[in-house]
Structures are given as C-alpha cells and as structure tokens.
Amino acid sequence: METLTPNRPDQSSPHPSTAIGLGVLAIAMWSLIGLVVGAAWLMAGDRPGPAAEGAAPAVAQGERPDRPVSAGAADRPERLRVPRIGVDTRLMDLDLTAKGELQVPPLSQPWTAGWYDRSPVPGEVGPSVLAGHVDSKTGPAVFYRLRELHRGDRVVVTRSDGRTATFRVDHVEQVSKSAFPTKRVYGATPRPELRLITCGGTFDAATGHYLSNVVVYAHLTSLTAA
C-alpha cells in the first residue's frame, strides 16, 4: 500500500487532539491493522498475537470465531454514533485480505468507520472491534477526536436486526504499537464490550507511520429490541 503523508495542522496552534499523532489509519496498515488480525487468533482460542511489526500472521481465511447464539448469522452493525465527539457514521465490513491483513476503509471515505467482521456483533458477548481513520490527505476524519472521550461517555451502535446497542466508555488509552496489548484489546471477555481504535502518537516521517494507537474501551449498558 502506498505510504501517504497526512495533512497535519500547524504545530504552533495545535488542535486539542494533536497529542494523538494525527495519523491516517491506512498508512500504518500493519502497525495498526496487523494487530487487529491478531484478534482472529485470540478469539479463536487464546493463541499468541502476531509477531513483530511488519510480519504477516498465518491466519486461515476460512477461520471465523463462532458467533454468539443470540445473534443471527447475517446480523451486523450498521451505524455508529458517539455524541460527545460528533461522530455519526455508517459502518462498513472489514475482513481479511488474501495476505491475512485486515482490510481498511478506503481513503476516499475518511468519514466512514469499519467493523472487523470476525469480531462479535456489538451487543453480543466479547469485544467488538471498530476502526477508523484519524485524518486523511485533505483533513480530519471520522476518529479525529477519539482521544477526547472520557469515562461514562455514550457510544451507540445500530444493528441490522433493528436493535440498538448502547455502551459506556470505561477508559481511553494511548499505547505504543511496539508493545501493543493485543490480548487486552482483542481477548475474550465475559460480557459484551466495544473497542474503538485509530492511530496515535508521534508521526515518524522516515517510515510514514505513527508510533502509537488510541484505544477506547467500553461496555454494554443496554440492548433495546427492534
């Protein structure tokens, strides 16, 4: 994938979220997304996460963690709303490529987030994973303000079965990609949870990558009927 240089604001008058490291999700495809691929291993049986950055794990293309019985096989999340930071986006499906790498939302749609469709449907037991761009070549993107979330903030996901899953943020952290807590982010949980992930940290101009990720952890508070 072509390495892109993001459109960053003037450092003399930084945006409140400049500390995130305003990264384009796609330019660090393995740095961020390779870690998401590790979820297929963890969810399938607590196997080790991916190897060092840049290595592609051998994930069988037909391997898909079992979906909870309470969710239909065709159910999926359709829309994400995060009122505090003004996010209201439809959700596309993100699967794995033939190389075992997670697909990313196209750069032509920087305001659309994606659901890793080998993770649980939001509202079902386990960590559902949503990923999105922080910015693009033309400016801010869907998760530009992700780091501004706080404990207790509301996150709402509308599903294809007509149900609405409402989550509350537990905490937000910035983590180094070189020491990404794969099991904590993608490992099995006894309750329905949600992860929102984007790039963060310092931009490395030499590699075109950002050195960290911003991860939001949230838990389900209600699942309303259609």
Image (cartoon, helix red, strand yellow):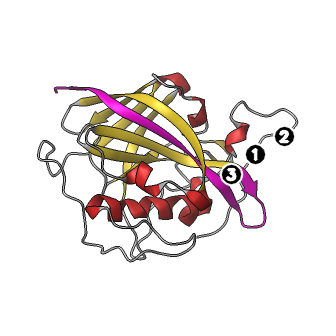
Query: Which amino acid, by three-letter code, is at mark 2?
Result: Gln
Residue at the spot 26% in from the left edge and 37% down from the top edge: 123
Dot 1 and dot 2 residues touching (CB under 8 Å): yes
Dot 2 and dot 3 residues touching (CB under 8 Å): no
**Residue at the right extreme?**
12
| Bounds of the magenta segment | 202-226
Query: Magenta: predominant secondary structure element?
Result: strand
Query: Which amino acid, by three-letter code, is at mark 1?
Result: Arg
Which one is in front, 67 or 43? 43
Which one is in front, 54 or 130? 54
Q: Which residue is mark 2?
A: 11
Cα–Cα span, label 2 and label 3? 17 Å
Q: Is residue 21 above or below residue 63?
A: above
Dot 3 and dot 1 residues touching (CB under 8 Å): no
Q: Which residue is mark 3?
A: 137
Q: Is residue 59 above or below residue 158?
A: below
Q: Which residue is mark 1?
A: 8
